[in-house]
Image: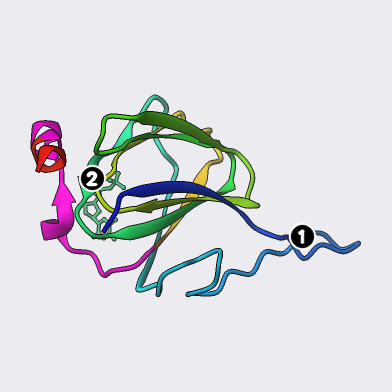
Amino acid sequence: MKARVAEIQFAPKGDSRGQLIALEALSEQVPFDVRRVYYIFDTTPGTVRGKHAHKALKQLLICVSGACTIECEMPDGTKSKYCLDWPDRGLLIEGLVWRNMKEFSKDAVLLVLASEHYDEADYIRDYNQFKKECAK
Ligand code: TYD
């Protein structure tokens, strides 16, 4: 699978009562079947999470409350940084991408939709190993 990071804009179904965003698996916004959902919250100030890549997992990250920063490194070494600070945007990450999650605001809730069940064997937690995999 080709590594890919893409910002996805959702269309809020707003009216005078407020906003609502609906996400459906296999839609344009969520281009995979969702097998797992988890969320990160109550993050200790200064914490950097992630610090790993996945071999095959597809994920859609949405900061549904507060804000956080996602840093990505592609297999060719290209680095990018995304500020997720509103629930109408998601960050799609597919394939071999090193990611750090940091600068969580106190009220940050980072929701993650994932294409696979939790599988430690899909993780690359060692940065040197990641660089080796990228060179293959
Ligand atoms: P970890 O991979 O360190 O989280 P992150 O990279 O998002 O900062 O996961 C923290 C712990 O939670 C670790 O013991 C594995 C466990 N875990 C699950 O059991 N299921 C899951 O879906 C995830 C993401 C983590």
Q: Secondary structure at mark 2?
A: strand
Report the front residue among 98 and 62.
98
Report the front residue among 36 and 29.
29
Residue 135 in view: yes
Residue 104 in view: no
Q: Residue at x 11, y 43 (%)?
A: 133
Magenta residue check for 121: yes
Confirm or deny contact between disc 2 and disc 1 (CB under 8 A): no
Q: Amino acid at mark 2?
A: Ala
- Cβ(mark 1) to ligand 1 < 8 Å? no
What is the quadrant of the N terminus in the image? bottom left
Extent of the magenta region: 114-131
Q: Secondary structure at mark 1?
A: loop
Q: Tell me residue 92's x, y (percent).
A: 45, 53
Report the front residue among 98 and 134.
134
- For disc 2, the marked residue is 53
**N-term mark: 2 or 1:** 1
Q: Tell me residue 33's x, y (percent).
A: 40, 75
Relative vertical location of residue 109 with respect to residue 30 in this rendering, above or below:
above
Q: Residue at x 16, y 40 (%)?
A: 134
Q: Amino acid at mark 1?
A: Gln
- For disc 1, the marked residue is 19
**Which of the 4 image quadrants contains residue 39?**
bottom left
Figure label count: 2
